[in-house]
């Protein structure tokens, strides 16, 4: 972290990690809806609450920021789960034939 601070790369690190976190949540939402449906939304809520609480508790700016991004992405994913269900209904994504409705 000293190297990052010395060369003023903190913003670049946070931006890159944010990009990766958001990119990671897209397939998580798609696979989550495929295998479990929208009933897993409380898991995203819990994960978001924990991450936001940890971001307040952590003093290091990089880790605090990344925890907040993870929490916000978890909250955003709740809405995306329900949107994903509509995308499946429209035929844009495959429906899990083994999951009971």
Image (cartoon, rainbow, N blue to C red):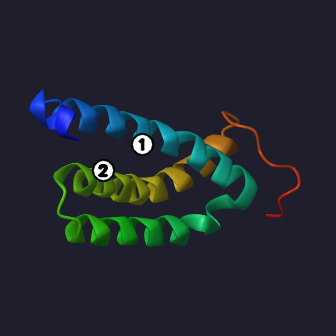
Camera-side residue: 92 or 25?
25
Which residue is pictured at 36% across the width and 59% down the height?
Answer: 71
Q: Is the residue 56 above or below the residue 15 in the image?
A: below
39 lies above or below 1: below
Which residue appears farthest toward the right when viewing the image? 98
Cβ atoms under marks 2 and 1 closer than 8 Å: yes
Q: Which residue is pictured at 24% across the width and 57% down the height?
A: 64
List the residue tagged with mark 2.
66
> Residue 85: image x %, image y %?
62, 51
Mark 1 or mark 2, which is nearer the start of the sequence? Answer: 1
Residue 35: x %, y % from top left: 74, 55
Q: Is residue 86 visible?
A: no
Is residue 80 at least partly visible in the picture? yes
Helix, strand or loop under label 1: helix
Q: Position of residue 48 (x, y in %)?
A: 39, 65
Left or right position of 1 against 47: left
Q: Quadrant of the N terminus?
A: top left
Residue 21's disc is 1
Report the disc number at residue 70: none
């Amino acid at each position: 972290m000293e190297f990052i601070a010395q060369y003023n790369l903190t913003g670049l690190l946070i931006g890159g990690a944010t990009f990766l976190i958001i990119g990671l949540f897209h397939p998580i939402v798609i696979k989550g809806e495929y295998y479990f449906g929208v009933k897993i939304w409380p898991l995203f809520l819990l994960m978001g609450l924990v991450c936001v609480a940890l971001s307040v508790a952590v003093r290091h700016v990089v880790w605090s920021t990344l925890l907040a991004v993870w929490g916000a992405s978890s909250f955003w994913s709740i809405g995306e789960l329900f949107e994903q269900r509509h995308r499946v209904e429209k035929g844009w994504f495959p429906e899990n034939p083994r999951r009971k409705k």
